Amino acid sequence: MFNKYIKIVIAVLITVWAGFQFADENIGNGILILLLAGVFVFFFFKNEFLLLAFLQIRKQNFAGAQKWLGFIKNPTSALRKPQEAYYYFLQGLMVTQTSMTQAEKMFKKALSLGLSMDHDVAMAKLNLAGVAMHKRRKREATTLLNEAKKLDKHGMLKDQIKMMKDQMKKI
C-alpha cells in the first residue's frame, strides 16, 4: 500500500511520461498513459482497501472486510482525513460484535474526524446509542437516537430507530 502522497507523485511522473509520448506524436500511448495516471489520482481520493472493505460489507462478509481493513497499517499516514473517518467507522462496525467499549471509541473517533454523508453519521450515532443503551446510559442513548432520526432524511434507519426506542422503554 502506498502512502497518500506517493500516489500523487506517481501520478505526476506518469503524467510527465504521457507528455513525452504526446511530444513524440504517440497520441494513443499518451492517452492511455494519462488514464493510468487517473487511476492513481482516483486512489488518492478513494482508498482501494476501503473500497474493497465496503464491497465485502455489502456482501455481508465481515471477515473479508476485516481482512481488507487489516492491510491499512497506519491510517493517519496512509489515508486522507475523510477516508480515516470511514476507516474508523468500518472498524467500529467490525468490533461491535466483540467489544462495545472499543466500538464506542471507534465510532466517536469517526464522528470527530467527520463522516461525509448524513446517513453514515446517523448510522454511527445509532450504533453509539446502542452502546449507550447496553451500558445503561438511557439519557445519552435517547439524545443519540433523536440526532440519528434527524439525520435520517430518507428513512433508511426508521425501523432500527423504532426498534431501539422500543427496547429503551424496557430499560
Image (cartoon, rainbow, N blue to C red):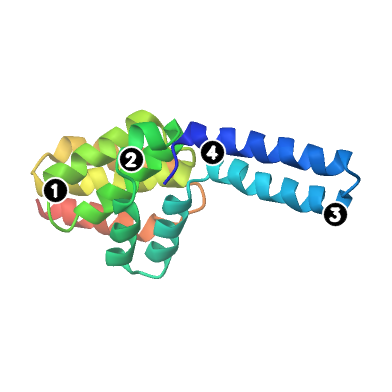
In the image, residue 127 lies at what x, y percent?
26, 48
For disc 2, the marked residue is 146
Taking depth in this image into account, of 42 and 154 the one nearest to the observer is 42
Q: Secondary structure at mark 3?
A: helix
Q: Is residue 131 left or right of residue 124?
A: left
For disc 3, the marked residue is 28
Could you give the CA–CA distance between mark 3 and mark 2, rounded to whole angstroms? Answer: 56 Å
For disc 4, the marked residue is 7
Q: Amino acid at mark 4?
A: Lys
Toward which corner of the image does residue 54 lie, by quadrant?
bottom left
Q: How many marks?
A: 4
Nearer to us of marks 3 and 2 is: 3
Residue depicted at x 80% and y 37%: 19
State which tag comes first along the sequence, 3 or 1: 3
Q: Is residue 11 visible?
A: yes
Taking the view exactly as shown, the residue that stands out farthest to the right is 25
State which tag comes first along the sequence, 2 or 4: 4
Taking depth in this image into account, of 166 and 1 the one nearest to the observer is 1
Nearer to us of marks 3 and 1 is: 3
State which tag comes first along the sequence, 1 or 4: 4
Nearer to us of marks 2 and 4 is: 4
Q: Amino acid at mark 2?
A: Asn
Residue depicted at x 37% and y 30%: 113
Could you give the CA–CA distance between mark 2 and mark 1, rounded to whole angstroms? Answer: 21 Å
Q: Is residue 160 left or right of residue 58?
A: left
Residue depicted at x 8% and y 44%: 135
Nearer to us of marks 4 and 3 is: 3
For disc 1, the marked residue is 100
Nearer to us of marks 1 and 4 is: 4
Residue 127 sits above or below residue 137 on the image: below
Could you give the CA–CA distance between mark 3 and mark 1, rounded to whole angstroms? Answer: 55 Å
Q: Which mark is residue 154?
A: none
